[in-house]
Amino acid sequence: MSCGADAVDAIEQLDVPHILCCLINSRSGGKAGQRVLESLRGKPDSCFGEKRIVFDLKDFIGFPEEAIESLRSSFAFQDEKLERDSPIRRFLIVGGGDGTMKWAMEILAKVNPPTDQVPALALIPLGTANELSRVSGWNAFRTRFNVSKYVQSVIRGPIVPIDNWKVEIAPREGESKSFSMICFMSIGIDAKVAAKFHKTREAASPFWTGSVIRNKLVYVYFGLKRLVSKHCALASRIDLKVDSTPTEFPASLQSIQVFNVCTAADGIYFWGTGRSTRDELQDYKDPALSDGFLEVCGLKNMMSVSTAKVQLAHSFRIAQATDVEFDVKAPKLVIQIDGEAWYLEEGSKVHVSSAGKIPLVTGPGRTFHLVPRE
């Protein structure tokens, strides 16, 4: 799918001065993250242009002010005459999976650069889940990373403004917490699988967590276990509001999904292309990452993941919306945001709302549902 009229003409950008700030998750993708970090640091400056700064994301754990300030100053350009004479293109290169992208957006929010210094996001897919990289054309660098070719792809790449979302979780008692969501979130059975996976990955030996393939095998294992587990419907455990309107959903659903990027679980298009059943949402537009809407749908069980994978079915379509709320009425429910999962307290409220748009550089590969169809 082409990037459309919103894309910046790449040909005109080749000779424009640029700054490349790189945030690389050295722990992502087994040893791949460390290799990419070393590659970016090891190349001469002539490969990058006017300015290149490379950070290891582990230095941003806990959002230390020193690291935040260092990144903030990196977006500044010291040649004031050049800044006046020619626009400076700023890029934030993020290496990791979808969880890393979420983390990078939270870091960028704390950096809070001036409007004229907001960088365009470019991706290096390294993690177990790389849905944003997949739909934006960066999976061409999934298995083989060449620094020179990658930098040229960033500098030449068209730019599309995509939706960014904020998830606020307010417990029954205590302070609310805010998170960035750039891909998807869910509450229910698939989030529980994600929680089990992350708990195991933290505790397991390096053999089981040292590569993307082994990570995926562990994930599949927990998915199969949930397939035969006790049915746990959500209708009596959460209340759902869509654009401030109470919204019912089938009692059979075990997960509610909220998508910005409508693919998950290694490229499954959960919203689907088939016709809606009689009980589903009837009138909707094809999802797009820059249309200002979220897709709200649900899974009946883990078998639904398999049928969606082979395009025999899709998730139950509930709504397209700009604002989504959940009231949690039962304990031990799990939420995941861009693959990061944790338990919700009974009485918690979850609110998903717009956090504006961010510029995204599209890669050289195939893109998917980035902009609305004409």
Image (tube, helix red, strand yellow):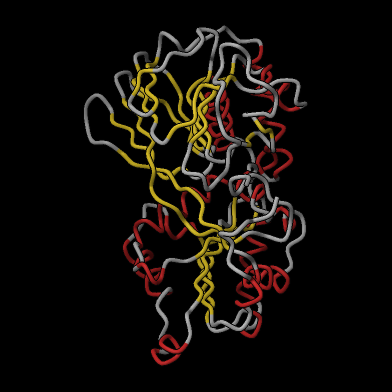
How far across and down, in percent of the image, does residue 125 sit? 65, 53
Left or right: 166, with 264 as reference point = left
How far across and down, in percent of the image, does residue 110 sit? 34, 57
Instruction: Give the residue drawn at x 64%, y 46%.
Output: 130
**Residue 2 sits in quarter:** bottom right
Instruction: Give the residue drawn at x 64%, y 83%.
Output: 44
| Foreground residue among 316 and 195 | 316
**Residue 71 sits in quarter:** bottom left
Image height check: is 212 above or below 331?
below
Image height check: is 351 above or below 317?
below
Question: Seen from this angle, which residue lies furthest bottom?
Answer: 81
Total tally of numbered discs in the picture: 0
Instruction: Give the residue drawn at x 65%, y 63%.
Output: 36
Image height check: is 33 above or below 127?
below
| Foreground residue among 122 and 81 | 81
Question: Seen from this angle, which residue lies furthest front?
Answer: 374
How far across and down, in percent of the image, does residue 336 sit? 49, 32
| Foreground residue among 36 and 284 | 284
Instruction: Give the residue drawn at x 42%, y 43%.
Output: 165
Left or right: 156, with 114 as reference point = right
Image height check: is 200 above or below 361?
above
How far across and down, in percent of the image, does residue 360 sit? 55, 58
